[in-house]
Structure formats: C-alpha cells, structure tokens
C-alpha cells in the first residue's frame, strides 16, 4: 500500500487533477466526508488528510510514503528525511512582508529601526531579515496575521499573498517579496528505496501531469 498525505483545501483540490492526469481516480469520498483516510481508484494507493503544516512530519516518519506540501511549510520543517523530487506548480502564491498602508518600510529599514514582525514562518522570516541585516523581534502567530499590525501587536507581517485582496481588505500593502511559493511532492527516503517499484511509476506519472498542467497555465 502507498499512502499519500494531503491537506484539505487548495492542496487537495489542486492535487486531484494531477492524480487524475496520472490515471488515478479520486475515491468516492471527498474530504468533506470527515474521513481522514480515503481510498482511491487504485487499490494500492490511499490518501490521508492532515494539517498542511503536518504533511512533512507524516512523510518524514514514514506514516505516509508521499505528501504534497507548500514550499513555505517545507522551509519551516527543514526537510529532514524527505526527498523532494517535483515542484508540482500548484497552490502558487508568494511569501511577503506586508505593512499598514502608509508605513514607510524602506525608510525604517534604511534607518536601522528595530521592527516587530508577526508571522507563522519564524524560521524563514528570521533567515530573510538576518540576510538583509534588519533587526527584528519576531512574534509567532498561528493565523490571521493581518490583524497584528491593526491592533499594535506588530509593525509588519510575513505571510503568504496570492491576489492581495485580504491585505487590501485590512489596509495592508505588500512591501517586499521574500520568495515565490508553490507546492512540492515530497517522498519518504526509505520508502523510495523499499517501494521503488510502485513509487517510481507514480512519481513519473505525477511529474508528467504537473508538467502538462504547468504548460497549460504557466
Ligand atoms: P493550517 O490550516 O494547517 O494552518 P494553512 O492555513 O496554511 O494550514 P492552507 O490555507 O490550505 O492551509 O494552505 C496550504 C498551503 O497552500 C500553504 O502552505 C501554501 O503553500 C499554500 N497557500 C496558502 N495560502 C495560499 C494562497 N493565498 N494562494 C495560494 N496558495 C496558498
Ligand atoms: Mg490558510
């Protein structure tokens, strides 16, 4: 049996067409069914539904052979025990610094001001600001980062942005892009050896499906 870990929402929704492209019909049950283990049309492949930030952990320990996780999540996890063969090109967005409209971020950085930054991406944010030589106090949050500057918890946030509509709705603006983000297929390193006969064709098929859909919508 091969186990593929996915998170609900856009990762699940955007991985299904790739599985279909690899000839794997989704199981009868959608994740809305509250089931956490879903069969697929391939009796040798099942899906498990976990929190986005837990996908690398399930794969690292071999509870899942494969998983789909955003680059944001993989950077925070560190990638230990994971083989990362394919950028699937799905769940695209960017990791950004955002601040209230009117906050002169570039000037604050130039002056060497100490900035309070709220984020769930502590590791990536720490590395980003250290590389720029910007002094920051990082405040760990688990969600709704946009709120933090509005109530004086932080000067700015580090968060994912796609359309920018959530930022605009909260009178925030992107002041710096840290990196583009997309979801990657990750594989347990031991599974890759012990289940190579079943995993290799699947990796190849998913890679082809991802390349085909990236060509269609670059
Ligand atoms: P959790 O619910 O466990 O806190 P989450 O809120 O990060 O996780 P999602 O919002 O489903 O879960 O995001 C899953 C992944 O999708 C992220 O890790 C990121 O790679 C990508 N993603 C997040 N936000 C966006 C976005 N606005 N546009 C495109 N992709 C995104
Ligand atoms: Mg979310």
Image: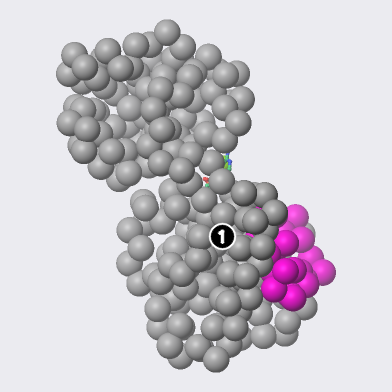
- Asked if residue 26 is among those painted magenta in the image, a careful observer would answer yes
Is 106 in front, or is 38? 106
Q: Quadrant of ligand 1?
A: top right
Q: Position of residue 106 (x, y in %)?
A: 30, 17
- Asked if residue 146 is among those painted magenta in the image, a careful observer would answer no
Q: Is residue 38 visible?
A: no
Asked where in the image residue 98 lies, by quadrant, the reply is top left
Left or right of 7 on screen, residue 13: right
Left or right of 176 on screen, residue 166: right
Q: Which residues are magenta?
A: 13-32
Q: How many marks?
A: 1
Is 172 in front, or is 145? 172
How packed mark 1 is, by other alpha carbons closer than 10 Å (few <14, some 14-19, many 20 or more), is many
Q: Position of residue 162 (x, y in %)?
A: 57, 35
Q: Position of residue 19 (x, y in %)?
A: 69, 69
Q: Where 54 sits versus 150, above or below? A: below
Q: Position of residue 170 (x, y in %)?
A: 55, 18
Q: Which residue is mark 1?
A: 88
Q: Residue at x 54, y 23 (%)?
A: 167
Q: Is residue 72 visible?
A: yes
Q: Residue at x 43, y 67 (%)?
A: 84
């Amino acid at each position: 049996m091969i186990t593929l870990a996915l998170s609900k929402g856009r990762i699940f929704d955007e991985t299904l067409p790739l599985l279909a492209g690899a000839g794997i019909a989704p199981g009868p049950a959608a994740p809305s069914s509250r089931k956490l283990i879903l069969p697929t049309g391939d009796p040798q492949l099942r899906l498990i539904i976990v929190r986005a930030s837990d996908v690398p952990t399930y794969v690292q320990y071999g509870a899942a052979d494969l998983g789909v996780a955003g680059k944001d999540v993989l950077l925070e996890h560190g990638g230990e025990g994971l083989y990362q063969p394919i950028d699937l090109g799905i769940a695209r967005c960017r990791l950004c610094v955002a601040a209230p409209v009117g906050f002169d971020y570039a000037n604050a950085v130039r002056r060497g001001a100490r900035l309070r930054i709220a984020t769930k991406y502590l590791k990536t944010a720490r590395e980003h600001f250290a590389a720029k030589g910007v002094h920051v106090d990082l405040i760990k949050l688990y969600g709704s980062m946009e709120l933090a500057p509005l109530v004086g918890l932080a000067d700015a946030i580090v968060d994912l942005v796609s359309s920018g509509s959530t930022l605009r709705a909260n009178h925030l603006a992107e002041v710096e892009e840290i990196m583009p983000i997309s979801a990657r297929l990750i594989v347990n390193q031991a599974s890759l050896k012990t289940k190579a006969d079943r995993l290799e064709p699947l990796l190849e098929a998913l890679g082809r499906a991802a390349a085909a859909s990236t060509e269609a919508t670059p």
